Amino acid sequence: MNFWSGLGVAAVAVLLLAWIVPTYGGRGFAVGMHPRTLATLGAWVMLVCASVLSLLSAIVLIRQRQPFFRLPEPGHLWHQTWPFLFVLGFIVLVDRFPLTWVAPFLIGSLLVILGERRWYVVVLTAVIPAAGLYGLTAHLMRIGVV
Amino acid sequence: MIGFDAILMSFAAALHYESIAIILGGVLLGYIVGVIPGLNRAVAIAIAIPLTFYMSAYAAIAFLIGLSKGTAAGSAVSAILLNTPGEPSSAATCLDGYPMARSGRPRKALKVGLLASVIGDLLSTLLLIAVVIPFASVALKFGPYELAAILIFALVFIAGMAGGSFLKGLAAGGMGVILGTVGLDPETGAARLTFGYAELMEGVPILPLVIGTLALAEMFVQLDEYRRNKGASVIKLSKDKEDDLSYQEFKGTLPTIFKSTGIGAFVGALPGLGPSVGAFMAYGLAKRSAKDPDSFGKGNPNGIAAAEASDNAVIPASYIPLFGLGIPGSVSAALLVGAFMIHGIQVGPLMLRDHPEMLFTLFSGMIVASMLMLAVGWYGLRIFAKVTSVPPHIVIPVVIFLCLAGIQVQGYGTFGLVTVFAFALFGYFLKKFDYSFVTFLVAFIVTPMLEMNLRQSVILSGGDIAILLDRPIALAFVVFTVLMALHLGWSSYRQWLRKRLKAPSS
């Protein structure tokens, strides 16, 4: 885990140092510090620390004769991924429809997925927060239905 | 300097019924959040920040401080009745709290935990008030050299002390620094890392960042771990008179409470260590110094008292570096900085000069919060015991909804939703791979201050590093930083070497 996370962070740091910070880090004449200095410093700290972490982890893996690649089981991978996809799907929906209307489906469907089968628990848990949001935004804050 | 009349006025303001109602709301909400396993202080503050937008600055901060204190006290309830700590720092409370509750004394265990929490919190708050004023008065005399040196020292210290690997801590700090530089450069006006988005001109918006990395990411982690916690059962409170805490029993725990409060206050004042370290240190010391150490782990009330007093003492003490130097030493302190920023107040020693009434009203509010904690915990014992039964599969969807609602209510729109999701992925990565979140958040928060002080130092010195010789405090902190980095690096290397030698060789 440390080997791959270190490698990932080091790769991001290289990307930052080689392209992102020089291109988007800001230009112009500065009397004191250049606008890019601190971001560059941060990226170097990331690169050095992550590289050392990867290297040390690689030594341990080699010494313990453990494999560098250990693919997770598809079931486990799916269990870790679906919540992100679920929330992302609802973010796409919220971008098109007000959250107040989408919320009961978001909460209700997640409850059912997580194993809740009592209909009154599903309905009440799904409706009460959405109704609270409606009351807050439409009546108390008067910013309309969000 | 603020006069005695102003201090009295600040107390009067904190004791106003509106103020009490707001603090009570914060404490109550904090208690409920603390009681529910899986929700923690950081999640609660992150979600509550949008609610405080429409409050005055004092009301907002008092509400958040009340909430923070409430979660610390409330987390003991689930630790004792469910053997599942509401906060990681209450894990030490489980060691004796759950066995005591299982042996038919749940009410006694809860009351010991509550009283220890309140005493630890109150004494630590008084210490904060006594220490922070002279601390901030000295800090006001510091120039950019000293402040830059202290900030760098604090970041390295937090990276080393926040738990886990020092290398990962520093890398997380680097990430925080990079994100902290996003926005318009204050000197040249150049847009930095904004990628053309006008929304990033003033920097990465703090609300999507904290809601994404703290609350939403935590819910993803909870969903991941949901299967493991399915079978937990709650201990019910009885009406048995034997289960009531007598004065003699309470008196027996007082020495442990005072010692543990001292430990908690010391740990809290050091940035980065956090309440878990304080609680376990106090528990360990109470066990070692007890006449009957074997009874620890089997339901000894002193075990609960030690863990809870220290856990609750850490929080007010962690505000010493915050109000004294402007350095947030914990996640909740960093979130408070965000709330202060939203209300246009720069937290730190300048508060003593620019908003002394606000500072004293906050301190008074903190004392009021401690008192309310006792009242809420004492009279709400049975209700909170019932709240522990709320299953996580109901909590998780509601919290995910609250995360999205917080973004929508503030009008961040599509940009906010995408940002919150991106930060949730980022926060999940930090949690799963054990990169220090506190270092990341503190680095993100202090980067603008660090950059301003570094820039002023470079301009004033003309790039001549020898100027440090004329600034002994700055020089001392530079030397401390180098020594600390070397020490932490060396300890990490030795730890790694020990592990390597223990591992089976090829």
Image (spheres, rainbow, N blue to C red):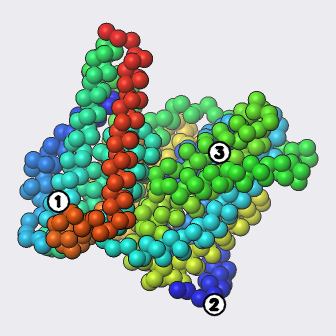
Q: Residue furthest top?
A: B506
Q: Nearer the viewer, residue B496 or A113?
A: B496
Residue B5's label in the rendered image is 2
Q: Secondary structure at mark 2?
A: helix
Residue B282's label in the rendered image is 3
Q: Where residue A10 sits: x, y (%)?
A: 21, 39
Give the spatial CA distance, label 1 vs label 3: 43 Å
Q: Nearer the viewer, residue B445 or B66?
A: B445
Q: Where residue B14 sits: x, y (%)?
A: 63, 79
The answer to whether B313 appears left or right of B423 in the picture is right
Q: Residue furthest right?
A: B241
Give the spatial CA distance, label 3 vs label 2: 39 Å
**Which of the marked residues, 3 or 2, is nearer the chain's N terminus?**
2
| Circles 1 and 3 on the same subunit | no
The answer to whether B120 appears left or right of B395 in the picture is right
Please name the amino acid that badge 3 sits on. Answer: Ala
Mark 3 neighbour class, 10 Å CA radius: few under 14, some 14 to 19, many 20 or more: many
Task: Tell me the residue at 58%/79% (across/down).
Answer: B361
Please name the amino acid that badge 1 sits on. Answer: Thr
